[in-house]
Image (cartoon, grey):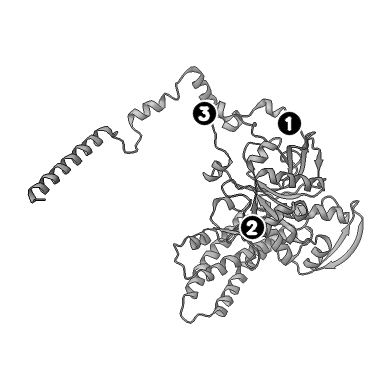
Amino acid sequence: MTKRYIALALAMTLATSGAMAQKKKQTQPDYNGDITTEMMQQMKKGFGGSASDKALRNIMVNQSPQKLAMNYENATKFDSHFSHRVVSKAVTDQKSSGRCWMFTGMNVLRNQAIRKHHLPADFQFSQAYLFFYDQLEKSNLFLQAMIDTYKKPMNDQEVEWLFKNPIGDGGQFTGVANLIDKYGLVPADVMPETYNTNNTSSISNLIALKLREDGLQLREMAAQKGMTPAKLQAKKTEMLGTIYRMLALTMGEPPAEFTWQQKDAKGEIVETATYTPKEFYEKFAKTDFSKYYMVMNDTTREYYKVYEIQYDRHVYDGQNWRYLNLPMEDIAPMCIASIKDSTMMYFSCDVGKFLNRDNGLMDMNNYDYESLMGTTFGMDKKQRVSTFASGSSHAMTLCAVDLDKDGKPMKWMVENSWGPNYGWQGNLIMTNDWFNEYMFRVVLEEKYIPANIRAMMDQKPIMLPAWDPMFAPEE
């Protein structure tokens, strides 16, 4: 091809490209993502300014949408009858703390201890005792992680997550199991609640501030030439001594041994004896936690697989949170079997959704936001989780189910830890539809799990990152 023809072909190509670009430019809207005047005019049409619109606006500007969306007809259908219920005792109160996971786990053991040893109905294990060690162990978990990850840069996602979450008062069931196995239990009157165990934010914030400072120092030390593991552990122990002092000043020091009067259900003294916390646990609440399994309904991940969450443990030498993911139709029958056998369960859900705080009913029909706002809210469970609109937020004790004549669940009940005056006598009631949509986790004893499902739990778990939004600690 001659130079003349090459030049001609190039000119034709450029001309064609220019014409196409010009045509494309003419057909594309002149829009860069801003809200334009035309768009604003179109949006305003959605609020027509009619008499009914103005009347609704005058009401809503001074009221909560939740209050105005209350479905009156649904509120009149409240029913507290249950065909099967585990008899529970006095309702506990976690006050202004995020210790729902601890109260829930200990309430399962407490109910068993009261029945087995005929203890008074208001008997409780000390949450303050276990919380002391929870905070100490979480501090060690963070500081050791600083040593383990010192080679990673500060902007590494794992390191960033650790510094963002050095400690907290939330948690889950494996924390209960690991802490009790390691430190035992004591009665509530041996180490009672303090202001700072009932109101955890102030001391937790102070400890977090100190841990971040110590974490930076450990990373710098670990990077020094010639630094030995022994020197790092000695420094970490010194730092934990400061944390121990902060905890002891605000919560009291846990007893190494104590004398306790055991009373029966009538309040009569049965025995006075001296125990260590481990001895007390062995006598009154000994449990083989290896026979407890967490199942979960995570609609964003494959069912019948086992998952494990990195760093989601309370004790460095304990177990990460591990669960088998199952559809609801597999979870419900196991829960029913446990309740029928008078065994409570650790249970967690997205508690605030469609909750009537006056009567404690959680029902999809409690609030009609669609009629109030003139739109729809149509996401399913998977879509809500994927878009951060829903996730497990609170742990309670699953204790009752109401079955129809065909054995199908109509509603469920949980014993809460927000005091006896919240909800229905300290309990929350949920319809089965709500249960399916907003329930996420339950811990079951091995004997209530069918053999085929139990066998699935032996598979190698799929590790998930600690920052996955589905696995925030329950509060």
Question: Where residue 277 appears, x then y in whole percent?
Answer: 78, 66
Secondary structure at badge 3 equals loop
Decide which of tag 3 and tag 1 comes sooner along the chain.
Answer: 1
Secondary structure at badge 1 equals loop
* 3D distance between C-alphas at marks 2 and 1: 36 Å
Decide which of tag 3 and tag 2 comes sooner along the chain.
Answer: 2
121 left or right of 238?
Answer: right
**Discs 3/1, front:** 3
**Mark 3 crowdedness (10 Å alpha carbons): few <14, some 14-19, many ≥20:** few
Residue drawn at 52 percent across, 26 percent down: 374
Amino acid carrying label 1: it is: Phe
- Asked whether residue 398 appears in the rendered view, the answer is no
The count of marks equals 3
Secondary structure at badge 2 equals strand
Which residue is label 1 attached to? Answer: 78
Decide which of tag 2 and tag 1 comes sooner along the chain.
Answer: 1
**Discs 3/2, front:** 2
220 relative to 65, above or below = below
Residue drawn at 63 percent across, 51 percent down: 304
163 relative to 45, above or below = below
Q: Quadrant of residue 377?
A: top right
Residue 166 - label? none
Which residue is label 2 attached to? Answer: 322
Which residue is label 3 attached to? Answer: 375
